[in-house]
Image: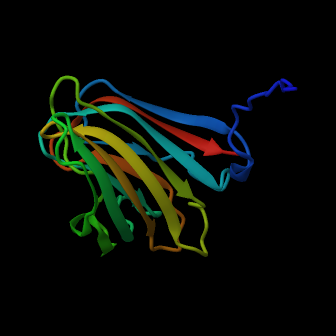
Amino acid sequence: MSTYTDIRYDYNLPSGFGGSLNLLATNTITSGVASSSFTSGIDSTYRTYLFKFINLHFSNQDEAFFLNFRDGGSAFDATKTTTFFFGQHKEDGTSGALSYDSDRDLAQSTGGHFLHLTTLTDNDASYSGEMYLFSPSSTTFVKHFIARVQGMSGAPKTVDAFTAGYANVTAAIDGVEFSASAGTIDSGTIKMYGIA
């Protein structure tokens, strides 16, 4: 004899994350900007911050979506060591692959870190994903991050980019910048959350 169990779904974060998402800031992009940054609200209030990218559309073909950090100064140039791999598949059913891309890695660089390979300017092309930043206010440890961005790229094809690394500084990270390698981010939304 089978029995029915009423399952109650909990839509909060899993217990390992420690709590719920608290929306801290929203950058809504309605016209071309070279970058979108968050320069307040990143402090010791939360140990983990989550940034969500929603339908970002870029002006230039075959450019990259970049990330950088500010560590107490005025510039987004914190030293970083990072890694990058991606899965891809074309609309015509060819070129399915999972690849590590050493050309996108950074080794002790102050330059922007690749969050996605190449942009596509088709009217229906956009990029969505998320990036976690851990303990940005620590003055003891390096600052780890992980990101995943899904987008429609040239050919056209789907590209699912996985990136991670750390800002190799012991100064607190107090700002995060997302940018286009050339041209502008023309539209979309970026949200910043603190995880309680």
Q: Is residue 24 left or right of residue 168?
A: right
| Quadrant of the image containing the C terminus | top right
Marks counted in the figure total: 0
Q: Eyeballing the image, is 109 above or below 183?
A: below
Q: Nearer the viewer, residue 177 or 62?
A: 62
- Quarter of the picture containing the N terminus is top right
- Front-most of residues 55 and 172: 55
Measured as percent of width and height from the top left, residue 119 is found at 19, 41
Q: Position of residue 126 (x, y in %)?
A: 28, 32
Residue pictured at 73% horizontal, 43% vertical = 19
As displayed, is residue 18 above or below residue 107? above
> Seen in the image, is 135 located left or right of residue 20?
left
| Res 179 visible | yes
Residue 165 drawn at (x, y percent):
43, 66
Residue at 74% x, 32% y is: 10
Judge from the rendering whether residue 126 lies leftward or rightward of residue 176; answer left or right.
Answer: left
At x 86%, y 25%, the residue is 3
Picture residue at 52% right of the left edge, 55% below the top: 133
Q: Position of residue 66 (x, y in %)?
A: 29, 52
Which is nearer the eye, 10 or 136?
Answer: 10
